[in-house]
Image (tube, rainbow, N blue to C red):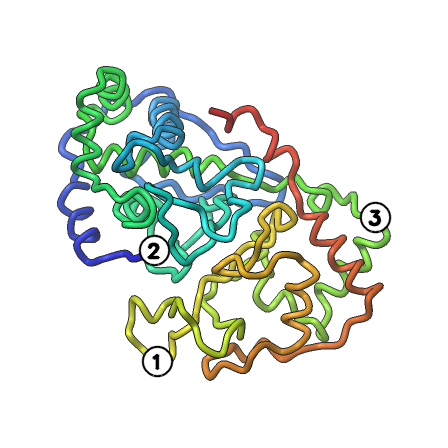
Amino acid sequence: MRYTPYILILFLILSCDRDKPIVPPSYKLEIPEGFPYPIIPEDNPLNWATLDLGKRLFFDPILSLDSTISCASCHKQEFAFADNLEVSPGVENRLGLRNSMSLANVAYYDLFLREGGVPTLEMQVLAPIHDHNEMAFNIISAAERMKNDSMYVKLSREAYNREPDAFVITRAIATFERTMISGNSQYDKNLLSESQQRGKELFSSNSLNCTSCHGTFLFTNQGIENNGLYENYEDSGRYILTHLQEDIGKFKVPTLRNIELTAPYMHDGSVETLSEVIDHYASGGKTHFNQSDLITGFSISESEKIDLINFLRGLTDEEFTHNSFFEE
């Protein structure tokens, strides 16, 4: 995915709130125990009208060039709003370089996209719409297409007191994505088995040091790291944004919540199983010159690996993946 200066400029031009919207009934997020309430942008209040519009747009291929690809095409509920493919196909079956990230708990994120190049959830919406290998469209044409649909004109006016435009599209989809909060796993309910408890202790141990990148209630520190996956990266990661040598191969640290469901793994979907993921980190990586100092390798027995994998499976939130609220 490439996020160009053009899109940033376009967002700034079209995001001005021209009219104060008529405020529909508000919607209050259901927050799991131990989770803070996420920050809601002042220009995008959470209410039933914005949520309804955002949900419809999330599942509607109207935002893609040939009306074949929607947000839900690459972010499926049964996979915690990720995908089970190495790389999800876009319009005309085009393939990019990156695996679809889970949208679970994006309401709490500071940066978006694999390289962490976008600072808000609203701005992130622009990226797949404009990406040649994803929706291959543009936000202006998408808004014009929506204006020809009386339902979308009506819903846009109810939600934002304006006809469909970039402001409406980005904010409505971001609103729906903010409701994707996952925090009701076995781990959260203190229902871990003995094996999972042992895996939890390993996960938090100094020898494995998993929590250095996957701590906090999100199970990610939201950092940008090179995890030593390759000696030479086809996708140069954050370097695409900064053109700094020190950013080659650096990608956003993903959440481990629902990790059992989001295979294949890594930024490019090149690792098929959790066992192989553990093997990679145990090996100490491929010693890329930008590799994080946190990737040092460790020893782990087969029985310990089983316990660790069982713990990671204990982060699966079946209430989230089966919640009818998120169904089309």
The crowd level at tag 1 (other Cα within 10 Å; few <14, some 14-19, many 20+) is few
Q: Earlier in the sequence, mark 2 or mark 3?
A: 2
Against 167, residue 220 (above or below) is: below
The crowd level at tag 2 (other Cα within 10 Å; few <14, some 14-19, many 20+) is some
Indicate the amino acid at tag 2.
Met
Q: Quadrant of residue 113?
A: bottom left
**As drawn, is 150 to the left or to the right of 327?**
left
User: At which x and y percent is residue 17?
Assistant: 18, 36
Against 49, residue 261 (above or below) is: below
User: At which x and y percent is residue 251?
Assistant: 44, 65
Q: Residue at x 49, y 41 (%)?
A: 37
Indicate the amino acid at tag 3.
Ser
Against 114, residue 101 (above or below) is: above
Q: CA distance from mark 1 to mark 3?
A: 45 Å
Nearer mark to the viewer, of 1 and 2: 2
Q: Residue at x 71, y 77 (%)?
A: 298
Q: Is residue 309 visible?
A: yes
Q: CA distance from mark 2 to mark 3?
A: 40 Å
Where is the N terminus found, in terms of image quarters? bottom left
Q: Which residue is mark 2?
A: 1
Q: Secondary structure at mark 1?
A: helix
Q: Which residue is mark 1?
A: 245
Q: CA distance from mark 1 to mark 2?
A: 19 Å
Indicate the amino acid at tag 1.
Gln
Q: Earlier in the sequence, mark 1 or mark 3?
A: 3
The crowd level at tag 3 (other Cα within 10 Å; few <14, some 14-19, many 20+) is some
Q: Residue at x 56, y 57 (%)?
A: 265
Q: Residue at x 60, y 54 (%)?
A: 256
Q: Which residue is mark 3?
A: 193
